[in-house]
Structures are given as structure tokens and as C-alpha cells.
């Protein structure tokens, strides 16, 4: 068992969830009423940083009273950034220095210290002292973004973990839908999954239709659905999404959702180009079956270790190949030109968002599109 727990990063929900799990493991389900636990409210609305740190140091120097040991929890400390800044108040610097020296001296055997809160600077002496401490447990939770290289894989792993803890099974199609339509905020992901659990009711399996039913109005989900409506050449679905988008823009009196929706479309069609290249590299047929990638031999994966289709889940590989098969090379190039032209008009203010998007939809899904696409 660790003597010092430090939980930080920039994912507030994940930090709070993990700190509560640690407290529960140390003090039981009814931790708030456990006499061994002393809580210092680090997010107090009435106490300043120096007052909170003074209270913490007082608790650390006070021996246990009703039990042979005690747990001290600096709960959700909201002042890491200010307390560790160069221009922090002298009294705050003094209290932080005292805390650093206390940790360096070694946490006493009769104390377990738990500290959590967003904004820890890993370059500062406080973090380094925690890291160097004997029997310390440091956990950093960071939000991920769509631009991160491993964003999708991390999201899928987290989705499966949440569903596993809830005793729910989730279809692979649903996992991929959620990983591509929900941002890197783990709190939001947890909330959306809990909504899906409720929506599914007594059913033990979460389907992609369940997820679409509860996530369909988020900007990310709209972007994903819009891109796939263009891939499917589904004019009705694409126009319906544009109507919803315009309503959101009107309600918010601004925003750049129209650019976000096109960015997802660009990524989708760029992925189709990469998919075609990957298919050509392994001589995959133009139309692959659902079990094609599940039957790929290990020797093939070793021969092409960087092939994207051999690195992702077989179901995902099948689905991206299915989408790529709907466009030949000429059609794919034209689709990207049309999307990029719409993006240019929106950036330059060359047209009303609704008209620009509706023109794009007509170009890619209307009757005249058959001659081009």
C-alpha cells in the first residue's frame, strides 16, 4: 500500500473518479463517515490557497487521535497552477515549500496522504518530490483530442473498460461510432455510455443504433453522420443534418460547426485514399467479405507491419474497405475537390453556410452527381 497518492492531469472527471476509487479502497464505501479519514477541501469557495495548505500542514503534523493511523485527503485541490507559479504569493510559496520538505523527509508510518486536482506542473519541485518519495503512487490523467495519434485507440479501450465495469457488452460498430463522435473528455464519454445503458434497458448488449439514438445531436456525431451520408450518397440524411446544424448555429448565434462538419468529411475521404493504398499493398480484392481480415495469416501481418488495415480491428478494416469500395479513384478525387471547395467558401465568407452545404450535398448526391460520381 502506498503512503502517498497523487492524482492529477487535465481530465477533471477522470481525476475525481480515480481519487474517489482510492479513498473507497482505503476507507470503505462509507468513507465520508470513516473517523480515520480527514478531508481538506481543496476546492473550497471560501478558503484561499494559503488557508487550504495551512490546514493540510496542520493535519500532517497532528498525530492520529481515535485510531493508530489516519488518511489525509487534500480533495480536488484547485490551486496547483497558481501555487506553483513563479509569481505566487510568498505565503503560498512558503506553505508549498513546507509540504515539499515534509514529503522529502518521508511520510510517517501512521499517515497516508492523498492529493488530487487538475493542473500539476511536472517540472516543479513539488511533483519531483512526490515522484521520488518511497511508496508513492502517481497517476496522471490527460484528455485526448481528435488530433492525437492514438486518440481513436485510446477511446475504444476506454469504452470497452467502462462497459466491462458496468457488465455490458457493446458491439464493435458501436465502439467505433462512439470513439469517432465523442471528444476526449472522459466525463462526457462516461455520461453518454450511461445514457446508452439506460436506453438499452434490460438488454445486456449496446448496439450502434442505441448510441446513435442518444448521441445524434452532438457536433461530433453530426459531423460523423454527415460524412457518412456523403459516402452513402444519401441526400435526405445529409440535408436533415444540415437543417439541424443551422438550428444549432442560430441558437448559439455563431460558432464554426459548419467547418467542423466539413473537417470530418475531409478526414473520412482521406481515410478512403489511405484504405485503397493499403488494400493495394496486400492485394486485397475490391470487395472484401466480413471475415476477410479475421482470416489474414500472421505471416502477412509480419510482411506488412505498417499496413493500416492489418493493424486495426478486423471489423473496422472491413468497414473502411466497404466505404472505400463505393468510390473509384476519379470519384474520390472529385469528392475531395468538392469538399475542399466548400470549405474554402466557408472560410472566406463566400456564401451562407446552409447554401454552401446544400450545394455540396447536391453535387455529391443529386441526380447530376451520377455523371461525375
Image: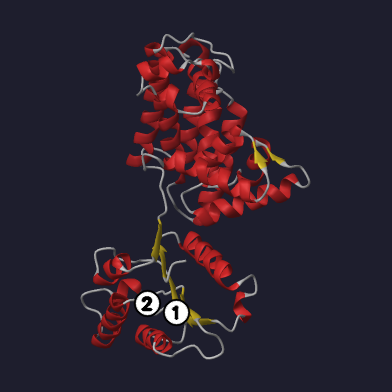
Residue for point 64% across, 70% down:
29
Mark 1 is surrounded, within 10 Å at the Cα level, by few (under 14), some (14 to 19) or many (20 or more) other residues, namely many
| C-alpha distance separating marks 2 and 1 | 7 Å
Quarter of the figure with residue 330: top left
Indicate whether 265 appears above or below 366.
below
Q: Residues within 10 Å of mark 2 (few under 14, many from 20)?
A: some
133 to 50, vertically: above or below: above
Q: Is any atom of residue 122 visible in this view? A: yes
Q: Is residue 368 visible?
A: no
Residue 19: give x, y in percent of width and height: 50, 66
* Residue 306 in the figure: left or right of residue 313: left
Q: Is residue 216 left or right of residue 336?
A: right
> Residue visible at 37% across and 13% down?
281
Tell me the SS state at disc 1: strand
Q: Position of residue 130 (x, y in %)?
A: 32, 69
> Where is 204 relative to 9, above or below?
above
User: Which residue is the site of mark 1?
Assistant: 111
Amino acid at each position: 500500500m502506498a503512503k502517498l497518492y497523487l492524482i492529477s492531469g487535465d481530465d477533471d472527471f477522470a481525476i475525481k473518479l480515480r481519487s474517489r476509487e482510492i479513498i473507497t479502497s482505503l476507507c470503505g464505501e462509507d468513507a465520508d463517515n470513516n473517523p480515520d479519514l480527514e478531508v481538506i477541501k481543496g476546492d473550497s469557495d471560501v478558503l484561499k490557497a494559503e488557508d487550504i495548505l495551512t490546514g493540510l500542514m496542520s493535519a500532517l503534523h497532528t498525530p492520529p487521535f481515535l485510531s493508530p493511523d489516519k488518511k489525509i485527503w487534500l480533495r480536488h485541490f484547485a490551486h496547483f497552477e497558481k501555487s506553483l507559479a513563479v509569481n505566487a504569493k510568498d505565503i503560498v510559496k512558503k506553505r508549498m515549500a513546507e509540504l515539499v520538505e515534509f514529503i522529502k523527509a518521508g511520510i510517517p508510518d501512521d499517515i497516508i496522504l492523498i492529493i488530487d486536482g487538475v493542473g500539476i506542473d511536472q517540472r516543479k519541485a513539488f511533483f519531483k518530490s512526490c515522484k521520488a518519495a518511497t511508496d508513492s503512487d502517481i497517476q496522471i490523467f490527460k484528455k485526448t483530442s481528435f488530433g492525437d495519434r492514438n486518440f481513436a485507440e485510446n477511446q475504444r479501450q476506454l469504452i470497452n473498460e467502462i462497459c466491462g465495469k458496468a457488465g455490458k457488452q457493446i458491439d464493435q460498430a458501436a465502439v467505433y461510432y462512439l470513439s469517432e463522435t465523442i471528444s476526449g473528455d472522459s466525463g462526457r464519454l462516461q455520461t453518454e455510455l450511461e445514457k446508452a445503458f439506460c436506453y438499452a434497458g434490460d438488454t445486456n448488449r449496446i448496439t450502434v443504433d442505441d448510441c446513435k439514438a442518444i448521441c445524434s445531436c452532438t457536433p461530433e456525431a453530426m459531423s460523423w453522420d454527415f460524412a457518412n451520408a456523403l459516402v452513402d450518397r444519401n441526400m435526405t440524411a445529409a440535408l436533415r443534418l444540415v437543417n439541424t446544424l443551422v438550428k444549432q448555429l442560430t441558437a448559439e448565434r455563431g460558432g464554426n460547426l459548419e467547418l467542423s462538419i466539413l473537417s470530418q468529411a475531409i478526414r473520412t475521404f482521406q481515410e478512403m485514399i489511405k484504405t485503397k493504398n493499403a488494400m493495394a499493398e496486400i492485394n486485397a480484392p475490391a470487395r472484401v467479405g466480413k471475415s476477410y481480415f479475421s482470416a489474414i495469416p500472421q505471416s502477412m501481418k509480419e510482411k506488412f507491419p505498417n499496413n493500416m488495415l492489418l493493424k486495426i480491428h478486423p471489423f473496422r478494416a472491413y468497414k473502411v474497405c466497404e466505404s472505400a469500395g463505393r468510390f473509384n479513384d476519379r470519384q474520390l478525387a472529385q469528392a475531395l475537390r468538392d469538399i475542399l471547395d466548400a470549405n474554402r467558401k466557408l472560410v472566406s465568407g463566400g456564401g451562407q453556410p446552409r447554401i454552401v452545404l446544400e450545394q455540396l450535398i447536391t453535387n455529391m448526391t443529386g441526380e447530376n452527381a451520377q455523371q461525375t460520381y
